[in-house]
Image: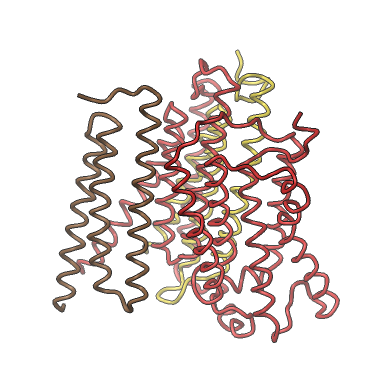
Amino acid sequence: MSHAFAYALVGAGLFLLGLYALVAYAHLLRKILALNIMGSGVFLVLVALAKRTGDAEPDPVPHAMVITGIVVAVSATALALALMLKVSGKTGQAVLPGRHQD
Amino acid sequence: MTLTDYATACLLILGGIFFLAGTVGLLRFPDVYTRLHALTKADNVGLGFIMAGLVLQAESWLAAGKLLLIWLLVLFASASVSYLIARRALNKGIRIWM
Amino acid sequence: MDVIVVLEWAFDAVLGLGLLWLAWRTLNSPDLFKAIVLFISFGLLMALAWVRLNAPDIALAEAAIGAGLTGALLLAALARLRTTTDNTMPAQLPAGSWFQRGLLIVLLSGSAAGLGYAVWILPSHTSGLSMAVTANLDVSGARNPVTAVLLNFRGYDTMLEMIVLLLAVLGIWSLGGLPPRPERPAVAVLDTFSRFLIPVFILAAAYLLWVGADAPGGAFQAGSVLGAAGVLLLLSGWRPGVRLMQWPLRLALTIGAITFIILGVLTLLYEQQLLAYPVAQAGRMIILLESLATVSIAVTLAILFLGESPDPEEKK
């Protein structure tokens, strides 16, 4: 097993940790954090698999896709945070209405 | 290994020790002010040693100058940010540990 | 085994476990402020992981965006959240019953095994598309392969991304903007700090933009550094004037996407392919696109942080 495979497995682990938290926690800010961590996991798998070139330079195409992905993730996060603030401004609670309220 | 390599290794290890001390201080000190003290003092000097070690290995004067510039920027940023954190802590009424 | 190999494995193991541990602590620490701070340190460790994977371009972008700007956005949102919600509600509040959580864990363990297996059975050595990129690097107009992919071979990705950035701003504006952040008294040190640092930021951004054709760097890294300068300005109390918020701002936000679209149409007409530059002009076109994209990315990121709608009527 090479270093790159180890990082790919860490990436898969991060994705699953994020997915668990996304479903298991109700607070919207935590869901946004979970989405970001899932994204980081995906990026890590992509770049780790791009490094399977041995001693040569890694494949630049996944690198470019991940750079694009990081910028898309930050803009999506900003929009999600704005939606969360709208929800909490209307309901007084940063959770999705209709669920999690016994 | 040449003499320069040995000097670099010594400086890097010395820098690492300072980082270790700073981290132990961050984890073990009792309040925000003493933790800031541990971080700024130890990390600035530790980074200084690491930069000095890397400057010895630099390929050109330009690269050495860039490393020096990075160190100065970190010094400036960490001093300002530590002040801001300490000031905010004081304003929030966090007591100084005695 | 060689000492260096052992040390490298030890470093990778510590880094990988550190990433997983920080992610876990981010997601389940009860205090949201603490969670965000842990997330920022997670971003910094990710930047280290990118360096270990020979991806310095991504490391630069991650350090500026993943650790810096996302953290600033999250902390600003948390400060606003505390003014609108009652803080009595525990931030953790698990959804669903213990049975549902147990079921979730079982399902996720299954997916974990599947994902791990899928990664495991992949061939351990493949060059992917790097041969194709290297073969065409000479005609791309850039010597850094990542820049060549971003601005030439897969320029349409970057074009769509500029539009995504624009849509995020439009989304926030059409929600009526964010509530203003709680005011903080001005601090002299922060003023001096920003005044000294912002020229350095601009210099660093210009350097990253210029060097991006040959070495790690480029429009995204330069744009995020400039955007961070904008965030610093906003934090030290500067606000763009009303006139600046009208057409100059809108032009800066859209100039990257507009240039991409115009060049896309022109190349479709003359080269019969979207964003296929004529070889002789490729270098110049990449620099033009990158400079304008840098402006748009920087202004968009700063505006996403500011979050206020520019329409004076809506503000009232």
Residue at screen point 40% across, 38% down = B84
Which of the colour schemes (rainbow, by chain, secondary structure, one colour) is used?
by chain
C9 and C48: which is toward the camera:
C48
Please state if C245 lies on the left or on the right of B27 as rendered. right
C118 and C73: which is toward the camera:
C73
According to the rendering, which colour does chain C have?
A: red
For the C terminus of chain C, give its image quadrant: top right
Residue at screen point 61% across, 55% down = C298
C282 and C14: which is toward the camera:
C282
Residue C191: % across, % down: 48, 44
For the N terminus of chain C, give its image quadrant: bottom left
A29 and C81: which is toward the camera:
C81
Residue C57: % across, % down: 50, 65
Residue B58: % across, % down: 30, 74
Which chain is drawn using yellow? A
Residue at screen point 41% across, 57% down = C49
Residue at screen point 51% across, 15% down = C88
According to the rendering, which colour does chain B have?
A: brown
Exactly how many numbered labels are in the figure?
0
